[in-house]
Image (tube, helix red, strand yellow):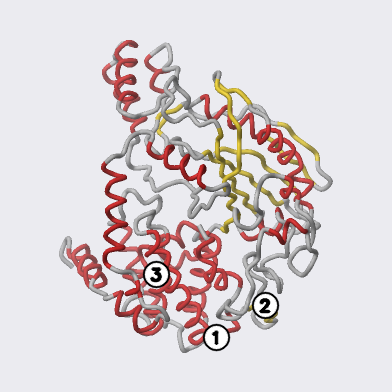
């Protein structure tokens, strides 16, 4: 193969896929065609987006968020991202380039301060202290994911609180927020908000199976926070280490957090001579953590769905709980279910988070990386490799797919954090690998190696997830299109793979608006 031939083939494949008439596919297979969106409505959406970008200023994001908060007492958040953004260790960051610049040219301290001042005047937020020497000036600078400069975080102080079956390491909300803002706050007021809105994330990390004779290893509940300001970096609030013996153990774990948060919601605290109130905007969690902190049934139970009261059926042969391919007959859960504390098949206790100014249903979202990437995408791959003959890929096709993955790794963009891994290393794939395969690699490597109807069915999921994570362009149109694609995917999943395989993850696609 000549040099450069593979990139040209990949480009041709992408161009062919781009010619896929999405409107025709939707109108033929979806219950409600996309033609309901008139051309004028789409043009108006694009015009509003263009105005916002054209008149963009440094306080645009804060002003927009503030206006939304004034209009509605409760927040509706479509997407939260707590994982690190795309980056490559091969590409030096601006912080590394500045450090190399100071070491190479040995500039004076005044020159470094003037350089940082110029960056600050052009919209880059800097830390107040630039250091007393060239090395300290360069080493005290770091680049955040949004392009803002700040000092590196420090976590020196934390409290160890003993629990009944473990221990809780509390970094403290106020302490973490103070440390967070002191690295970012400056004399300007263009971003200042009297009330800070915080997103929280809860993740359960299970330890690997212990060897014989070593006993059972503990699990972890990690609590993260992130403020909705320009510096878009998460910080650690607390870490629990221990076991989860009862469904209501999270009430004991979260008691220190709830007591501190109740005080911060009602009483102002000062940072750099500025007074703040703190409010929780939304909560992101994986399915297991969502069940623990809300005191509800686990996802694999019959009433495990946190969005509707659809009852599942236990599939003993498959080892899962299956759900119907549609949620039309189910009743959606409301925030009042947690207010009244009804103990039924879904609610197993009264969550301590209910004491906060927080809606335990509408302000909670399930992380799509666990449901879609590690859940559905991983299950589909297992079906294609070890499932029935109707959809199982033969050994030759799997080898070709793996070879394409290896070949594409040579041309992987440097913005991607990891290069694609072959199928032989499938047991080493993490959530990021499954995400990259679903969003980028799969349409190319799967084409011509699987049946056409199964390939088109998979494209429904691929296109829907690409639409949902595409941002705020054409929000109304995108939400409708993605919802119809996912509804079609779930309905056809029952016909192609069997209704007994529609587990909690596939069922949650019907509630895609609450996935992030």
How would you rate the neighbour count of disc 2 (Cα within 10 Å): few for under 14, some for 14-19, many for 20 or more? many
How would you rate the neighbour count of disc 1 (Cα within 10 Å): few for under 14, some for 14-19, many for 20 or more? few
Q: Residue drawn at (48%, 78%), measured in percent from left and top?
A: 385
| In the image, farthest residue toward the right | 164
Q: Position of residue 394 (x, y in %)?
A: 42, 83
In terms of secondary structure, where does tag 3 sit?
helix
Q: Position of residue 253 (x, y in %)?
A: 75, 45
Q: Which of marks 3 and 2 precedes in the sequence?
A: 2
Q: Dots 2 and 3: beta carbons under 8 Å? A: no
> Split into 4 quadrants, where in the image is the N terminus?
bottom left
Q: Residue drawn at (68%, 34%), measured in percent from left and top?
A: 266
| In the image, farthest residue toward the front | 71
Residue linked to disc 1: 498
Q: Position of residue 97 (x, y in %)?
A: 31, 29
Q: CA distance from mark 3 to mark 1?
A: 25 Å
Q: Residue drawn at (71%, 33%), measured in percent from left and top?
A: 263
In the picture, measured across the screen, residue 388 lies left or right of residue 460, that is: right
Residue linked to disc 3: 481
Which is more toward the observer, 165 or 248? 248
Residue linked to disc 2: 312
Q: CA distance from mark 2 to mark 1?
A: 15 Å
How would you rate the neighbour count of disc 3 (Cα within 10 Å): few for under 14, some for 14-19, many for 20 or more? many
């Amino acid at each position: 193969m000549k040099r450069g031939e593979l990139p040209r083939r990949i480009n041709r494949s992408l161009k062919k896929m781009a010619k896929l008439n999405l409107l025709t596919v939707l109108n033929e297979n979806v219950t409600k065609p996309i033609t309901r969106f008139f051309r004028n409505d789409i043009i108006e959406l694009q015009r509003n987006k263009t105005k916002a970008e054209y008149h963009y200023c440094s306080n645009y994001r804060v002003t927009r968020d503030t206006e939304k908060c004034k209009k509605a007492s409760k927040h509706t958040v479509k997407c939260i991202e707590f994982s690190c953004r795309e980056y490559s260790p091969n590409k030096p960051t601006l912080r590394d380039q500045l450090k190399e610049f100071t070491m190479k040219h040995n500039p004076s301290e005044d020159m470094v301060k003037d350089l940082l001042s110029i960056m600050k005047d052009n919209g880059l937020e800097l830390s107040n202290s630039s250091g007393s020497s060239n090395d300290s000036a360069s080493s005290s600078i770091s680049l955040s994911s949004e392009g803002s400069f700040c000092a590196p975080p420090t976590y020196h102080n934390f409290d160890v609180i003993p629990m009944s079956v473990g221990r809780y390491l509390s970094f403290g909300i106020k302490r973490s927020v103070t440390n967070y803002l002191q690295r970012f706050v400056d004399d300007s007021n263009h971003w200042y908000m009297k009330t800070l809105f915080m997103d929280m994330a809860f993740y359960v990390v299970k330890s690997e199976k212990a060897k014989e004779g070593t006993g059972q290893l503990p699990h972890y509940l990690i609590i993260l926070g992130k403020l909705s300001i320009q510096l878009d970096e998460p910080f650690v609030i607390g870490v629990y280490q221990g076991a989860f013996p009862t469904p209501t153990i999270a009430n004991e774990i979260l008691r220190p957090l709830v007591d501190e948060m109740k005080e911060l919601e009602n009483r102002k605290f000062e940072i750099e001579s500025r007074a703040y109130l703190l409010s929780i905007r939304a909560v992101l969690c994986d399915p297991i953590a969502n069940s623990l902190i809300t005191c509800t049934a686990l996802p694999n139970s019959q009433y495990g769905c946190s969005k509707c009261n659809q009852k599942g059926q236990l599939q003993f042969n498959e080892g899962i709980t299956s759900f119907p391919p549609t949620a039309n007959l189910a009743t959606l859960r409301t925030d009042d279910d947690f207010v009244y504390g009804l103990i039924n098949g879904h609610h197993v206790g009264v969550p301590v988070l209910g004491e906060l100014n927080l809606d335990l249903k509408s302000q909670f979202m399930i992380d799509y990386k666990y449901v879609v990437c590690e859940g559905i995408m991983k299950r589909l791959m297992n079906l294609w490799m070890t499932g029935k003959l109707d959809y199982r890929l033969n050994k030759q096709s799997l080898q070709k797919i793996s070879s394409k993955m290896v070949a594409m790794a040579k041309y992987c963009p440097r913005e991607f954090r990891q290069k694609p891994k072959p199928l032989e290393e499938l047991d080493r794939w993490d959530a990021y690998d499954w995400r990259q395969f679903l969003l980028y690699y799969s349409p190319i490597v799967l084409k011509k190696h699987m049946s056409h109807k199964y390939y088109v069915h998979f494209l429904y999921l691929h296109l829907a997830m690409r639409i949902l994570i595409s941002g705020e362009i054409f929000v109304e149109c995108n939400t409708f299109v993605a919802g119809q694609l996912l509804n079609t995917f779930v309905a056809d999943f029952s016909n192609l793979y069997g209704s007994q395989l529609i587990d909690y993850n596939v069922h949650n696609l019907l509630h895609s608006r609450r996935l992030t």
